[in-house]
Image: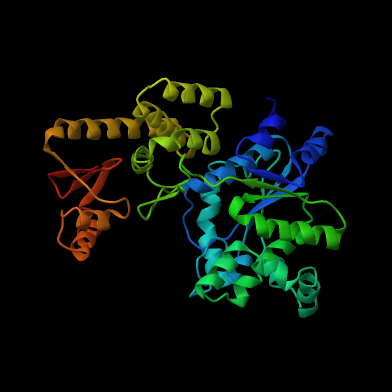
Amino acid sequence: MDKIDELLARGVDKIYPSKEALEKVLRSGKKLRLYQGFDPTGTQLHIGHLVGFRKLRQWQDLGHHVIFLIGDGTGQAGDPSGKRGAREKFMERDELRANAKDYLMQVAKIVNFEGSNPVEILYNSDWLNELKLVDILHIAQNFSVQQLIERDMYQERLKRGEQINLREFLYPLLQGYDSVAMDVDLEQGGTDQTFNMLAGRTLVKNMLGKEKFVMTTPLLTDAEGNKIGKSEGNVIGVTDPPSELFAKIMSLKDSAIINCFTLITALPLNSVAQKENRLKDGENPINLKKELAAQIVSEVHSPAAAKKAQEEFEKTFQKREVAADLIEEVSAAPGKITDRLVEAGIVASKSEAKRLEDQGAIEEIEPNLYRIGKRKFIRFK
């Protein structure tokens, strides 16, 4: 597999109009202008975002012009993708720009903003906030209401009797116009952004008269399709302290190991295949998970930080293994830890469980094994 093959395969879900068409352009030697946008609706990026950052770095290393777009314009509309209901609050540009300050520091752990081919940083409020009424009308005429309302999430909202806010409804048009404003050849984004990115493909064709490729990247999940990036309501943050990041990765399901190696690390694919074979041959998954945690901490912090974090984890874990005979096994359905504690009869009420959680008295040591208070250990069956 050469570099172009890997670019078109690793961490890729679909390519529009086709993989073959994009490969032909790349093999011709043409360098593309491409981007991925991120709406800074919060201040912290999680490991799920690393999927996109890793792919952007691949493009950058091959000499293409990469744009990291801060969506402080689209963020004002509010992306409805993946939302079950309409937003209760919409953010303003100043608030979004303030959130974005930390984004660049976090992204710089993976992509290069300096050097011979630096990633360019743009803010889409610079053009979206300048649109006049006639501009918006010219954008809107490229779509029908039927096209926009066909989105699965809108149909689900309608079935549930949920409202569709017109502000959110316009979001695909604004994101689509980004491609026109930047005159890009390709847009990259998660599978949940497919509709919005294809809207941009339509606008580039109609307004600029040229082709725009769309590359979708898979959402980070375990083998069962459960999203990774947030666990029990706690974000696995890119900037978490090394020891905390290491421990959170160790709490992931075993079925997430290979997906994480493939999508969010720079480890060569042949090395990932070797690790997958070790799992298939029956090696203890905890060994592979330690290697995964060390790899990620090394890449977003440093190898020295990863080594220290692993030593701290192993020291803590081994101490707790001595108390294995103190572990009580209980039954409770999967869900939030506070709900599970109530169902298992460990605490009397959700408010008591929430109080323990707020005090830091609930800690996940490994999947399904928790410390409650100072000396109580429980394992969920």
Place of residue 265 in the rendered image (x, y in percent of width and height, measured from the top left): 52, 35
Place of residue 42 in the rendered image (x, y in percent of width and height, measured from the top left): 48, 61
Place of residue 10 in the rendered image (x, y in percent of width and height, measured from the top left): 62, 35
Farthest right residue in view? 209
Left or right of 43? Residue 12 is right
Q: Answer whether residue 91 is visible to the viewer in this image.
A: no
Q: Quadrant of residue 100?
A: bottom right
358 or 232, nearer to the observer: 232
170 or 154, nearer to the observer: 154
293 or 378, nearer to the observer: 378
Q: Quadrant of the N terminus?
A: top right
Farthest front residue in view? 159
- Up/down of 311 relative to 210, above or below: above
371 or 132, nearer to the observer: 371
Left or right of 21? Residue 351 is left
Left or right of 296? Residue 74 is right
Q: Answer whether residue 90 is visible to the viewer in this image.
A: yes
Say which residue appears at 78% left-offset and 70% top-offset.
139
- Up/down of 4 relative to 179, above or below: above
Place of residue 94 in the rendered image (x, y in percent of width and height, measured from the top left): 56, 70
Q: Quadrant of the C terminus?
A: top left
Say which residue appears at 70% left-offset and 40% top-offset.
117
Say which residue appears at 52% left-offset and 39% top-offset.
264
Callout count: 0
Say which residue appears at 24% left-offset and 33% top-offset.
317
Farthest bottom residue in view? 133
Q: How is the image coloured?
A: rainbow
